[in-house]
């Protein structure tokens, strides 16, 4: 009789390639998964009608007028994308030192949210709470003698968040990095009876060069004075990001975000492992532009690289990803394998 004893947990008895040997086995043993439900589609808006204007450095991304955004929302919903994150292009005429357009109840963001909710009521809508699309200096807060004023900015952000929630946004996402803003916004929403509005905090947001194409997309590129290092985080810091998350949760955030995405995946994992709360990552404009540029010059396969990048977010622990690729990827995922 053959002797079946012996062996153990090492080679040649353990061969990890066994599980990788065929497509069905790789699928069966995949630890993470990606579906359209994981995607939040980042969409840029521009005033007007029937506008679909290409964004520089972001092939496949367009500035959409409200009517086009409604069509986009319907398409997204049809593919299972749960939510859209909207961002407004604002020309220099509508910008001012105090960013007053942010508090115009009839501004582009509010009008678009109402229009989408009127015809695609079941899609989630997310908006930034920050002043950068509306200030003539391009900063997220009020600027006085070269300093970004914290508490004065927070007062305005509270009003902005209330206005946005009333216009139909389901999730307000403070992206400004002022101290104390999440708690203040939560109190403002409660006071207004907006108890079901979610706060997704841009908790771990770095002062990053990867935002370059976005600033062009929303019209901030040539207006931004200086940099955002006095309020956005230093890319060298990780522990500080955990403090940011702890505070935002304490102040009433429902979910938190790490931004940018791929270069900061360590933070996605640390935040998820530490707090076990809904954790999102933003694959920002510069990440989009890099993949597109490499695909256009033939260095990378666009489809495969995009999918891999999103798989990596899921493996790292993200519950979802805000990405300009959302529609394209949802279409891919809808195709039979
Ligand atoms: C504004 C904001 C930025 C992004 C989202 N909201 C840029 C910035 O903080 O300067 C970046 C998005 C992207 O690059 O895709 N607070």
Image (spheres, rainbow, N blue to C red):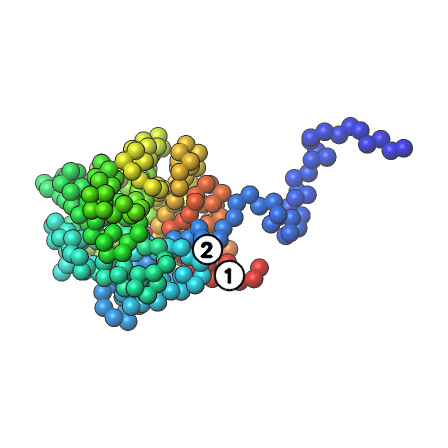
- In the rendered image, residue 247, in percent from the top left (x then y), is placed at 29, 33
- In the rendered image, residue 2, in percent from the top left (x then y), is placed at 87, 33
Q: Mark 1 points at which residue?
A: 334
Label 2 close to label 1 by CB (< 8 Å):
yes
Which residue appears at 46% of the width and 55% of the height? 36
Q: Which numbered tag is attached to residue 36?
A: 2
Does 274 sit above or below residue 67? above
Does 127 sit above or below residue 12? below
- In the rendered image, residue 331, in percent from the top left (x then y), is placed at 47, 62
Which residue appears at 31% of the width and 52% of the height? 170
Work out how far the residue at label 2 is from the one at label 1, CA to CA, in angstroms.
8 Å
- State the residue lying farthest toward the front: 193
Label 1: few (<14), some or many (≥20) within 10 Å?
A: few
Depth check: 132 or 297 in front? 132
- State the residue lying farthest toward the bottom: 50
- In the rendered image, residue 206, in percent from the top left (x then y), is placed at 31, 40
- State the residue lying farthest toward the right: 1
């Amino acid at each position: 009789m053959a002797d079946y004893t012996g062996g153990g947990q090492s080679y040649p008895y353990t061969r990890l390639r066994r599980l990788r040997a065929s497509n069905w086995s790789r699928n069966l043993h995949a630890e993470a998964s990606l579906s359209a439900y994981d995607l939040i589609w980042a969409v840029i808006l521009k005033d007007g009608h029937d506008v679909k204007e290409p964004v520089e450095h972001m092939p496949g991304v367009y500035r959409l007028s409200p009517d086009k955004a409604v069509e986009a929302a319907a398409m997204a919903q049809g593919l299972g994308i749960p939510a859209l994150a909207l961002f407004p292009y604002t020309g220099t005429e509508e910008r001012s030192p105090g960013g007053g357009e942010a508090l115009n109840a009839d501004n582009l963001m509010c009008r678009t949210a109402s229009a989408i909710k009127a015809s695609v009521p079941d899609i989630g809508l997310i908006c930034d709470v920050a002043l950068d699309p509306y200030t003539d200096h391009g900063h997220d807060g009020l600027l006085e003698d070269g300093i970004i004023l914290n508490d004065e900015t927070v007062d305005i952000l509270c009003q902005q968040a209330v206005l946005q929630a009333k216009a139909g946004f389901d999730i307000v996402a403070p992206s400004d990095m002022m101290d104390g803003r999440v708690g203040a916004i939560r109190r403002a929403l409660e006071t207004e009876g907006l108890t079901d509005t979610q706060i997704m905090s841009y908790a771990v947001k770095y002062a990053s060069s990867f935002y370059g194409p976005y600033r062009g997309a929303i019209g901030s590129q040539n207006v931004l004075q200086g940099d955002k290092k006095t309020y956005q985080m230093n890319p060298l810091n990780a522990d500080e990001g955990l403090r940011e998350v702890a505070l935002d949760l304490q102040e009433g955030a429902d979910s938190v975000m790490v931004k940018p995405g791929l270069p900061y995946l360590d933070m996605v994992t640390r935040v998820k492992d530490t707090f076990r709360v809904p954790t999102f990552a933003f694959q920002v404009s510069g990440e989009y532009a890099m993949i597109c540029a490499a695909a256009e010059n033939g260095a990378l396969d666009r489809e495969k690289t995009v999918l891999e990048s999103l798989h990596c977010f899921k493996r790292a622990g993200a519950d979802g990803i805000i990405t300009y690729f959302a529609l394209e990827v949802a279409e891919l995922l809808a195709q039979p394998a």
